[in-house]
Image (cartoon, rainbow, N blue to C red):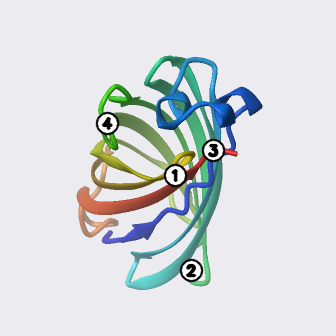
Amino acid sequence: MKRSILLALLGCSSFSACAAGMEGMFGQGRTHFLLEVGNGYAFNNNYLILGAGVNYYVLNGLGVGLSYENWSGSGPGINKISPSVQYVFYQASSIKPYVGMFYRHATVSGLAAINSAGARAGVYIASGSHSAIGIGFVQESYLNCQTAVYARCSESYPEISFTFGF
C-alpha cells in the first residue's frame, strides 16, 4: 500500500498554554486536539482520509496520543486506530525537532484486521507565537502481513502538519 497523507493538525491547548509561547505548546499538562484531512492510496484505489485525535503532554515535550482515521471514497473501507508517543525537543529555538512511535490497528472491509508499528521524525517550525508547521517522515511496518493480500508490508511517507495553540 502506498499513500501520501497531508495532516491538518489543529491543536487546541489549554488557556494557560495560549499565554505561553512556542515552548508552552509542548509543556507538561497541555492537550492538543487533532483533525486530519488527506489522501491515500491502497488496493489500487485513491481514498479521502478524515481523522481526529488527541495528544496529551505528560512531561515537557513528551506527549501520548490516540487518533482515529476513516478512509472513504473507494473500496474496501478502511478504519484505523493509533495510540502514539512523541517527544518534541521544545528547548530548541524556532525549529523544534520531534521523534515518535505509534502502533496502528486497521480494519479493512472483507479482510482480517492488520496491525502495524512505526516511527516518525521531523521538525516543527514556528509560524507564529502560538502555531507551528510540522514537516516529517514516517516509516511504518505491517505486522503479520501477507504479501498475497497486501502489495507491500512496509512503507515510508512524508507528513505535513499544522499545530495551533488557542
Return the disc, 4 or 2, that comes first in the chain's sequence: 2
Q: Residue at x 40, y 77 (%)?
A: 41
Q: Which quarter of the figure is the C terminus placed in? A: top right
Q: Amino acid at mark 1?
A: Ala
Task: Give the label on residue 93, or none.
Answer: 4
Give the foreground label among 4 and 2: 4
Q: Residue at x 34, y 25 (%)?
A: 91
**Helix, strand or loop status at disc 3:** loop
Residue receiving disc 1: 106
Q: Are marks 4 and 2 in contact (CB under 8 Å)?
A: no
User: Crowding near pointer 4: few (<14 within 10 Å), some, many (20+)?
Assistant: few
Which type of secondary structure does the marked residue at label 4 adopt? Answer: loop
Give the mark nearer the N terminus: 1 vs 4: 4
Residue 13 versus residue 55: which sits nearer the camera? 13
Q: Residues within 10 Å of mark 3 (few under 14, many from 20)?
A: many
Indicate the position of residue 158 as horizontal and vertical percent values: 29, 62
Query: Does residue 128 sit above or below 101 in this rendering?
Result: below
Q: Which residue is mark 2?
A: 75
Nearest the camera: 35 or 135?
135
Q: Earlier in the sequence, mark 3 or mark 2?
A: 2
**Pointer 3: what residue?**
165
Q: CA distance from mark 4 to mark 2?
A: 45 Å
